[in-house]
Amino acid sequence: MSPSRPFFDSPSGEFDTGQILFEAIPLAKLVAGIGVAALLPQLVHWLFVELFSITPALGFVFTLATQFVLAVGTGLVLIYVVVRAHQLADQ
C-alpha cells in the first residue's frame, strides 16, 4: 500500500484546499509577524536619522538590527516548517 500524500484527497487525488489553508494561515501569520518586527528598527532609524537629524552613523546600527531580526526570523520559520513536516509525516 502506498503512503498517503498529505495534501491530497485520497479518493479523488485532488488537492485538499482546506488542509492547505489550515497549514498556510499560521505560517503566513508567523512570516507577517517577523516582517513587522523587522520593520521596527527601520522605523526607529527613520525617526532618529531622517526626522530628528541625529548622526547618520546610527543608520548602520539599525540596518544591522534589521538584518539580525530577519536572520533569526528566517531560522524560526524554517524550524516551524521542519517541525510541522515531521508532525504531518507521523500522522
Image: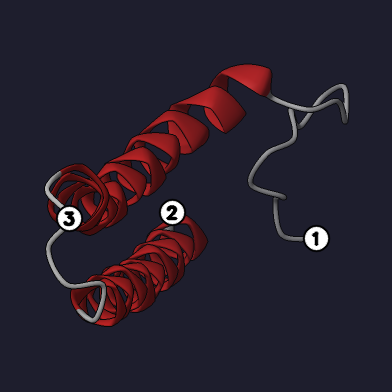
> Residue at coordinates 39% horizontally, 59% vertically from top-left?
84
Q: Is residue 58 above or below residue 4?
A: below
Please give the residue where the numbered disc 2 appears in the rendered image: 91
Identity, as a three-letter code, of the amino acid under mark 1: Ser
User: In the image, residue 39 lies at what x, y percent?
Assistant: 30, 48
The Cα–Cα distance between marks 3 and 2, rounded to whole angstroms, is 57 Å
> Residue at coordinates 86% horizontally, 25% vertically from top-left?
14
Please give the residue where the numbered disc 3 appears in the rendered image: 53
> Residue at coordinates 45% horizontally, 63% vertically from top-left?
81
Q: Secondary structure at mark 2?
A: loop
Which one is earlier in the sequence, the residue at label 2 or at label 1? 1
Please give the residue where the numbered disc 1 appears in the rendered image: 2
Instruction: Count neighbours of disc 2 (C-alpha within 10 A) and say few if under 14, some if 14 to 19, many if 20 or more.
Output: few
**Tag in front: 1 or 3:** 3
**Tag in front: 3 or 2:** 3
Identity, as a three-letter code, of the amino acid under mark 3: Ser
User: In the image, residue 36 lies at what x, y percent?
Assistant: 28, 42
Q: Secondary structure at mark 1?
A: loop
Quarter holding residue 58: bottom left
**Tag in front: 2 or 1:** 2
Which one is earlier in the sequence, the residue at label 3 or at label 2? 3
Quarter holding residue 18: top right
